Image (cartoon, rainbow, N blue to C red):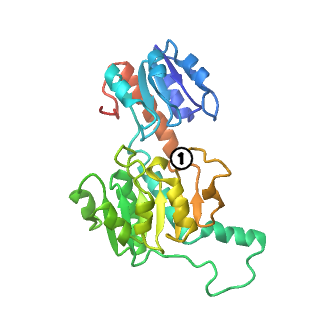
């Protein structure tokens, strides 16, 4: 059988495929996304496809490909209705990136609330002239209320890391209460409105669904405290970026940190990039060497198992 890999992935993952007996591997050997024409040509006649979250897997691609595995925990790049209709099995990579993404979420929160990129720039451009009582002041986590949108694996891991900072209270919202998940942090399930109104820090870690798309909008930001900090490490489309820009530019909220945007990459002339109180990273939540290697291996094992008709280590249940 033949498989197509849409990007240069960690060697450990490619090794799993190349050393599997009876499989021929073709790879788009580049750090950059495979062009659409090359993707369609690459999957033609292949029984399996290993893709990334930046690859749009739609009907046209599915017409040419067989089994499918994505090296991501998210799956909004996949035409799920079409996949389900065709009975195509899909592997994905949850759990393995939880810790790395949670670490990045905390780093982004601290960078935004303590104004770290601004401070670094002041050192570099000569703005650091002396110690000043109110210069570069931000907001701390001690005695704060943290609201988490989506208390899943990553949301819980974020709360676990923030708790030692002296957070006074955790709130969370989502599709429904999760008493067992929230018990560790004595977290209270509340409405989205109440979470916005009471939180000093809002961290978004939910999945992108029709219900969450555009959830963080003008109404949401208007309800937040003027001293609050907003962080999103889920998916860019959960946020209305124009509304976020207005909230930051007009002082409705204090700061924001984003690891995900719409589109990706964000154009260099985007208004959000003009703001000092908005820290934007290039979707690096899972970017540790160990995590990316583990993701590649799991994606490869998922694909092989699917093609062999075996149970996948992690199959997306449609």
Measured as percent of width and height from the top left, residue 152 is found at 33, 52
Residue at image x 46%, y 26%? 58
Q: Is residue 58 above or below residue 106?
A: above
Judge left or right: residue 181 versus residue 288: left
Quarter of the image that includes the C terminus: top left
Above or below, comparing residue 272 to residue 5 in the picture: below
Q: Is residue 175 left or right of residue 97?
A: left
Residue 183 in the image, given as x and y percentages of width and height: 24, 63
Residue at position x 37%, y 43% from top?
Answer: 209
Q: Looking at the image, can residue 66 be seen?
A: yes
Q: Label 1 crowding class (10 Å Cα cut-off): few <14, some 14-19, many 20+?
A: some
Q: Residue furthest right?
A: 126
Q: Position of residue 48 (x, y in %)?
A: 45, 20
Residue under label 1 = 262
Q: Observer-nearest residue: 109 or 307?
A: 109
Q: Quadrant of residue 145?
A: bottom left
| Mark count | 1
Residue 23 in view here: no
Q: Residue at the bottom extreme? A: 133
Which residue occupies 30% across, 33% down? Answer: 317
Q: Quadrant of residue 202?
A: bottom left
Q: Is residue 292 above or below residue 272?
A: above
Image check: 80 left or right of 182?
right
Q: Is residue 265 left or right of residue 313?
A: right
What kind of element bears circle 1? loop
- Give residue 37's position: percent from left, percent from top: 60, 21
């Amino acid at each position: 059988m033949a498989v197509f890999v849409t990007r240069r992935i960690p060697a450990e993952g490619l090794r799993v495929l190349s050393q599997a007996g009876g499989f021929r591997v073709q790879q788009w050997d580049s750090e950059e996304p495979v062009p659409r024409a090359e993707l369609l040509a690459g999957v033609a006649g292949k029984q399996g496809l290993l893709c990334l979250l930046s690859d749009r897997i739609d009907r046209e691609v599915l017409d040419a490909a067989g089994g499918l595995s994505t090296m991501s925990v998210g799956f909004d790049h996949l035409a799920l209705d079409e996949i389900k209709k065709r009975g195509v099995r899909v592997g994905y990579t949850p759990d393995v990136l939880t810790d790395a993404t949670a670490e990045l979420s905390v780093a982004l929160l601290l960078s935004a609330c303590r104004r770290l990129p601004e401070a670094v720039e002041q050192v570099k451009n000569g703005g650091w002239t002396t110690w000043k009582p109110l210069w570069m002041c931000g907001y701390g986590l001690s005695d704060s209320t943290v609201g988490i949108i989506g208390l899943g694996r990553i949301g819980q891991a974020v709360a676990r890391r923030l708790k030692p900072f002296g957070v006074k209270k955790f709130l969370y919202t989502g599709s429904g209460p999760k008493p067992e998940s929230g018990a560790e942090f004595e977290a209270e399930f509340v409405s989205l409105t109440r979470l916005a109104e009471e939180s000093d820090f809002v961290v978004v870690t939910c999945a992108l669904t029709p219900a969450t798309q555009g959830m963080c909008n003008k109404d949401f930001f208007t309800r937040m405290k003027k001293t609050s900090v907003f962080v999103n490490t889920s998916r860019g489309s959960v946020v209305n970026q124009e509304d976020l820009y207005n909230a930051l530019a007009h002082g409705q909220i204090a700061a924001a940190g984003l690891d995900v945007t719409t589109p990706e990459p964000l154009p260099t002339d985007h208004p959000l990039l003009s703001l000092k109180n908005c820290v934007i990273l290039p979707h690096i939540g899972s970017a540790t060497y160990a995590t990316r290697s583990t993701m590649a291996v799991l994606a490869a094992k998922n694909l092989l198992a699917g093609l062999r008709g075996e149970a996948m280590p992690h199959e997306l249940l449609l």
